[in-house]
Amino acid sequence: MPTRFGYIGAIAAFASAALIATSVALTATAATAQNKYDPGASDGEIKIGNIMPYSGPASSYGVIGKTEAAFFRMINDQGGINGRKINFISYDDAYSPPKAIEQARKLVESDEVLLIFQPLGTPSNSAIMKYMNAKKVPQLFVASGGTKFGDPKNFPWTMGFQPNYQSEGRIYAKYIRDKFPDSKIAVFWQNDDAGKDQFKGLKDGLGDKVGMIIADKSYEVSDPSIDSQIVALHDSGADIFFSWAAPKGSAQAIRKVGELGWKPKFFLANTATSVASVLKPAGLEFSKGIISTAYLKDPTDPTWDKDPAVQSWRAFMDKYYPDGDKANANNLYGYVQAEAMMQVLRQCGDNLTRENVMKQAASLKNFHSDLMLPGVMVNTSPDDYFPIEQMQLMRFNGEAWELFGDVITGEVGHEASR
């Protein structure tokens, strides 16, 4: 039978245990109070949605989504971001705007992702932009250079990443005005917001020299052939040719220009410069001398063979995406986008609300991936949703791209997005 002191000891022990339990509970409550979550985030996980054209006329871009999935697998193996694993959910929209809307709704309403990262294509992103902003879900680092995706006043939940198309057009225009002021220009462009943006940048950049453009032809991304457009532009008598098209259309244009024996000064959209998916299918012999722009290191350029960042990226590819083509610049592009996404989530800390995700995305200061060209920096602010505004011209030598000139800051078309 317990003694009086036994009862006292038992009571003391119970009181001590209760005090400890209360203390633990208070500590847990305090810790929980510091963590802020919206749907798609928890103590152990962050759900990120993604929409890619894994099929359809722009399917060559699908490798970007595969690289990003591989990147997040690597990050999860390393412990995640701030201790949380990334659940990367990527769906195919076949480069179809109606399908993109369907997939966006599925990601937001069924999968309950924290955000949609890197949805690809100007048409698809244009289709989901109003929905994403109405739902107040980040549509972050859009894979398009459309100027409309840098409009925080009207679409505060949508932000691009790469240099915008109008800026790219202005850079080409400056080079042409300086080097070829008496030339005649023919333009082949994609009949959507992307093509219109690029064409506008070129015309704005030419200014009082806009009369240099003597012919233009558009095409639909679903067109099986673009031969008639290229023949018509060839017959115009132009000595400068612009191709602003998705990879498939660009490859067809390069091949047709070559088959016609036409030798214009050839300018190619930055989004279609992949040696693996554009230039090789078109024919390297027809691609020699083409001029474009870059803001990332090119894995096919011997200049970067011993570059530590490129070597590290190649090791990543070998381990996490061994089927990926290391000559395809889209695989490097996807890696850099995922690095930027990781930086935003790191800055979020334990405040993983959608509002804070956009706040941190709009607070990037001199962020630089080592896979970007030297001098290219990412800077954003609440009223500047154009993260990258610098590019450098490059020329294809028949085997690889060679950079030339200085890094140029394009005149961003802010006025077009307000």
Image (cartoon, rainbow, N blue to C red):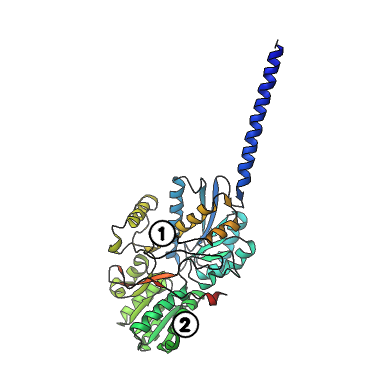
Please report whichever mark, 2 or 1, sits nearer to the chain's N-terminal start.
2
Question: Residue 234 has which mark?
Answer: none
Horizontally, residue 8 falls left or right of residue 200, namely: right
User: How dense is the environment of label 2, judged by Cα within 10 Å: few (below 14), some, or many (20 and up)?
Assistant: some
Q: Could one spot residue 78 in this view of the protein? A: yes
Image height of 314 relative to 254, above or below: above
Image height of 346 relative to 256, above or below: above
Figure quadrant of the N terminus: top right
- Residue 277 is situated, as x and y percent measured from the top left of the image, at 37, 66
- Residue 18 is situated, as x and y percent measured from the top left of the image, at 67, 28
Q: Helix, strand or loop at disc 1?
A: loop
- Disc 2 to disc 1, how far (Cα)? 31 Å
Q: Which residue is mark 2?
A: 204
Q: Could one spot residue 224 in this view of the protein? A: no
The amino acid at mark 2 is Asp
Count numbered badges in the picture.
2
The residue sitting at 38% across, 89% down in the picture is 236
- Residue 219 is situated, as x and y percent measured from the top left of the image, at 46, 78
Image height of 202 relative to 25, above or below: below
User: How dense is the environment of label 1, judged by Cα within 10 Å: few (below 14), some, or many (20 and up)?
Assistant: some
Residue 225 vs residue 89, the one in the foreground: 89
Image height of 311 relative to 385, above or below: above
Q: Which residue is mark 1?
A: 369
The amino acid at mark 1 is Ser
Residue 233 vs residue 157, the one in the foreground: 157
Residue 323 vs residue 142, the one in the foreground: 142
